[in-house]
Image: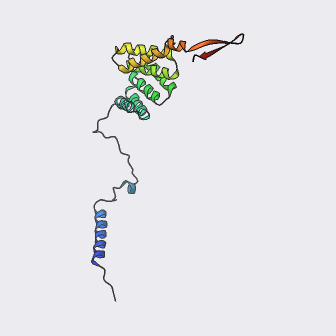
Protein backbone atom coordinates (compact mmCIF):
# COMPACT_ATOMS: atom_id res chain seq x y z
CA UNK A 1 0.00 0.00 0.00
CA UNK A 2 1.37 3.31 -1.05
CA UNK A 3 1.24 6.24 1.30
CA UNK A 4 0.29 9.72 0.12
CA UNK A 5 2.34 12.77 1.05
CA UNK A 6 0.66 15.28 3.25
CA UNK A 7 -0.44 18.57 1.66
CA UNK A 8 1.95 20.47 3.98
CA UNK A 9 4.96 18.50 2.73
CA UNK A 10 3.91 19.02 -0.89
CA UNK A 11 3.53 22.77 -0.32
CA UNK A 12 6.99 22.94 1.29
CA UNK A 13 8.57 21.04 -1.59
CA UNK A 14 6.90 23.30 -4.16
CA UNK A 15 8.02 26.43 -2.31
CA UNK A 16 11.63 25.20 -2.25
CA UNK A 17 11.46 24.29 -5.94
CA UNK A 18 10.01 27.68 -6.91
CA UNK A 19 12.66 29.51 -4.88
CA UNK A 20 15.44 27.58 -6.59
CA UNK A 21 14.02 28.26 -10.04
CA UNK A 22 13.47 31.95 -9.26
CA UNK A 23 17.03 32.42 -8.02
CA UNK A 24 18.59 30.77 -11.01
CA UNK A 25 16.51 32.69 -13.55
CA UNK A 26 16.91 36.25 -12.16
CA UNK A 27 20.55 36.76 -12.89
CA UNK A 28 22.25 34.74 -10.20
CA UNK A 29 25.73 33.58 -11.15
CA UNK A 30 25.61 34.04 -14.90
CA UNK A 31 28.32 34.49 -17.53
CA UNK A 32 29.01 38.04 -16.38
CA UNK A 33 30.02 36.78 -12.94
CA UNK A 34 33.64 37.81 -12.14
CA UNK A 35 34.29 34.52 -10.36
CA UNK A 36 33.44 32.55 -13.53
CA UNK A 37 35.25 34.85 -15.97
CA UNK A 38 38.36 35.32 -13.81
CA UNK A 39 38.10 39.12 -13.94
CA UNK A 40 37.87 40.60 -10.46
CA UNK A 41 37.71 44.35 -10.04
CA UNK A 42 38.17 46.23 -6.81
CA UNK A 43 35.64 48.96 -6.12
CA UNK A 44 36.88 52.41 -7.01
CA UNK A 45 36.42 55.75 -5.34
CA UNK A 46 32.94 57.18 -5.24
CA UNK A 47 33.30 59.97 -7.76
CA UNK A 48 30.05 61.59 -6.73
CA UNK A 49 30.93 61.71 -3.03
CA UNK A 50 32.41 64.76 -1.37
CA UNK A 51 35.60 64.21 0.61
CA UNK A 52 36.30 65.90 3.91
CA UNK A 53 39.66 67.53 4.43
CA UNK A 54 42.06 65.36 6.44
CA UNK A 55 42.89 68.30 8.71
CA UNK A 56 39.25 68.71 9.69
CA UNK A 57 38.88 64.99 10.30
CA UNK A 58 42.13 64.88 12.28
CA UNK A 59 41.10 67.82 14.47
CA UNK A 60 37.75 66.20 15.22
CA UNK A 61 39.42 62.91 16.08
CA UNK A 62 41.89 64.63 18.43
CA UNK A 63 38.97 66.31 20.21
CA UNK A 64 37.33 62.88 20.54
CA UNK A 65 40.55 61.38 21.96
CA UNK A 66 41.06 59.07 18.96
CA UNK A 67 44.74 59.87 18.47
CA UNK A 68 45.71 56.83 16.38
CA UNK A 69 42.93 57.56 13.86
CA UNK A 70 43.89 61.24 13.93
CA UNK A 71 47.43 60.30 12.87
CA UNK A 72 45.99 58.54 9.82
CA UNK A 73 43.85 61.56 8.95
CA UNK A 74 46.77 63.98 9.33
CA UNK A 75 48.94 61.70 7.19
CA UNK A 76 46.31 61.86 4.43
CA UNK A 77 46.26 65.64 4.84
CA UNK A 78 50.05 65.71 4.46
CA UNK A 79 49.72 63.93 1.13
CA UNK A 80 47.11 66.42 -0.03
CA UNK A 81 48.54 69.67 1.43
CA UNK A 82 52.19 68.88 2.12
CA UNK A 83 53.87 69.31 5.51
CA UNK A 84 52.22 72.59 6.42
CA UNK A 85 52.23 74.13 9.89
CA UNK A 86 48.74 72.76 10.53
CA UNK A 87 49.74 69.23 9.51
CA UNK A 88 52.91 69.34 11.64
CA UNK A 89 50.95 70.68 14.60
CA UNK A 90 48.24 68.05 14.18
CA UNK A 91 50.73 65.19 13.91
CA UNK A 92 52.59 66.51 16.97
CA UNK A 93 49.40 66.83 19.00
CA UNK A 94 48.25 63.33 18.08
CA UNK A 95 51.64 61.89 19.04
CA UNK A 96 51.48 63.81 22.32
CA UNK A 97 48.09 62.28 23.01
CA UNK A 98 49.60 58.82 22.42
CA UNK A 99 52.47 59.56 24.82
CA UNK A 100 55.12 59.60 22.08
CA UNK A 101 56.92 62.61 23.50
CA UNK A 102 60.05 62.47 21.33
CA UNK A 103 58.14 62.39 18.04
CA UNK A 104 55.67 64.98 19.28
CA UNK A 105 58.40 67.38 20.37
CA UNK A 106 60.22 67.15 17.04
CA UNK A 107 57.02 67.84 15.07
CA UNK A 108 55.81 70.66 17.33
CA UNK A 109 59.21 72.36 17.24
CA UNK A 110 59.13 72.21 13.43
CA UNK A 111 55.69 73.80 13.52
CA UNK A 112 56.68 76.71 15.79
CA UNK A 113 59.83 77.36 13.74
CA UNK A 114 57.61 79.16 11.23
CA UNK A 115 55.81 82.46 11.66
CA UNK A 116 52.47 80.78 10.92
CA UNK A 117 52.25 78.76 14.15
CA UNK A 118 49.00 79.25 16.05
CA UNK A 119 48.81 79.69 19.84
CA UNK A 120 47.54 76.13 20.32
CA UNK A 121 50.79 74.77 18.88
CA UNK A 122 52.85 76.77 21.37
CA UNK A 123 50.51 75.62 24.15
CA UNK A 124 50.82 71.95 23.15
CA UNK A 125 54.61 72.20 23.13
CA UNK A 126 54.39 73.73 26.61
CA UNK A 127 52.25 70.80 27.78
CA UNK A 128 54.81 68.38 26.37
CA UNK A 129 57.67 70.17 28.14
CA UNK A 130 55.72 70.10 31.41
CA UNK A 131 55.34 66.34 30.96
CA UNK A 132 59.10 66.05 30.52
CA UNK A 133 59.75 68.19 33.61
CA UNK A 134 61.31 71.09 31.68
CA UNK A 135 59.35 73.72 33.59
CA UNK A 136 61.29 76.86 32.65
CA UNK A 137 61.01 76.25 28.92
CA UNK A 138 57.37 75.17 29.30
CA UNK A 139 56.64 78.48 31.00
CA UNK A 140 58.17 80.34 28.05
CA UNK A 141 56.02 78.36 25.60
CA UNK A 142 52.87 79.16 27.58
CA UNK A 143 53.84 82.85 27.73
CA UNK A 144 54.24 82.92 23.96
CA UNK A 145 50.93 81.11 23.43
CA UNK A 146 49.19 83.51 25.83
CA UNK A 147 50.64 86.54 24.04
CA UNK A 148 49.69 85.25 20.58
CA UNK A 149 46.19 84.43 21.82
CA UNK A 150 45.77 87.86 23.49
CA UNK A 151 44.62 86.08 26.65
CA UNK A 152 41.44 84.77 25.00
CA UNK A 153 41.86 81.07 25.83
CA UNK A 154 41.11 79.95 29.38
CA UNK A 155 43.07 76.72 28.96
CA UNK A 156 46.24 78.54 27.86
CA UNK A 157 45.89 80.96 30.77
CA UNK A 158 45.40 78.06 33.21
CA UNK A 159 48.45 76.27 31.81
CA UNK A 160 50.54 79.43 32.22
CA UNK A 161 49.38 79.81 35.81
CA UNK A 162 50.27 76.21 36.56
CA UNK A 163 53.72 76.58 35.01
CA UNK A 164 54.34 79.79 36.96
CA UNK A 165 53.27 78.14 40.20
CA UNK A 166 55.61 75.22 39.61
CA UNK A 167 58.61 77.38 38.71
CA UNK A 168 58.31 79.92 41.50
CA UNK A 169 61.53 80.25 43.44
CA UNK A 170 59.98 81.21 46.77
CA UNK A 171 57.75 78.25 47.48
CA UNK A 172 58.13 78.43 51.27
CA UNK A 173 55.16 79.46 53.28
CA UNK A 174 55.61 81.08 56.71
CA UNK A 175 53.48 78.38 58.32
CA UNK A 176 55.69 75.69 56.84
CA UNK A 177 58.84 77.40 58.10
CA UNK A 178 57.45 77.59 61.62
CA UNK A 179 56.54 73.92 61.77
CA UNK A 180 60.17 72.84 61.92
CA UNK A 181 63.03 73.75 64.26
CA UNK A 182 66.72 72.97 64.07
CA UNK A 183 67.74 70.91 67.12
CA UNK A 184 71.28 70.14 68.15
CA UNK A 185 72.12 66.55 68.99
CA UNK A 186 75.34 65.96 70.87
CA UNK A 187 78.27 68.24 70.12
CA UNK A 188 78.12 68.61 66.32
CA UNK A 189 75.11 66.83 64.84
CA UNK A 190 71.92 68.70 63.99
CA UNK A 191 68.52 67.12 63.44
CA UNK A 192 65.43 68.75 62.00
CA UNK A 193 62.39 67.88 64.06
CA UNK A 194 58.81 68.89 63.78
CA UNK A 195 57.50 71.14 66.53
CA UNK A 196 54.75 69.42 68.49
- From the viewer's side, name the closer residue of 41 and 168: 168
Residue at the spot 31% in from the left edge and 66% down from the top edge: 20
| Residue 105 locus on image (x, y percent) | 49, 22
| Residue 132 locus on image (x, y percent) | 52, 22
Residue at the spot 35% in from the left edge and 42% down from the top edge: 44
* Quadrant (top left, top right, bottom left, bottom right) of the N terminus: bottom left
Where, by quadrant of the figure, is residue 15 drawn?
bottom left
Residue 98's place in the image compared with 179, above or below, is below
| Residue 188 locus on image (x, y percent) | 71, 10
**Extreme-bottom residue of the structure:** 1
Residue 96's place in the image compared with 173, above or below, is below
* Quadrant (top left, top right, bottom left, bottom right) of the C terminus: top right
Q: Please say whether residue 146 is visible from this viewpoint.
A: yes
Where, by quadrant of the figure, is residue 66 drawn?
top left
Residue at the spot 30% in from the left edge and 72% down from the top edge: 12
Q: Please say whether residue 173 is visible from this viewpoint.
A: no
| Horizontal side, residue 37 vs residue 178: left or right | left
- From the viewer's side, name the closer residue of 56 and 195: 195
**Extreme-right residue of the structure:** 187
Amino acid sequence: MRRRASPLKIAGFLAALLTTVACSSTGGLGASDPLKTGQVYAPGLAKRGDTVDGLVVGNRLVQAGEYELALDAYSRAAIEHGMTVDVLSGLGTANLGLGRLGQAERLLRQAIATDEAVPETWNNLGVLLMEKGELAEAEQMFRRAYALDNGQSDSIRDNLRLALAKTEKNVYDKEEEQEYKLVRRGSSAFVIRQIP
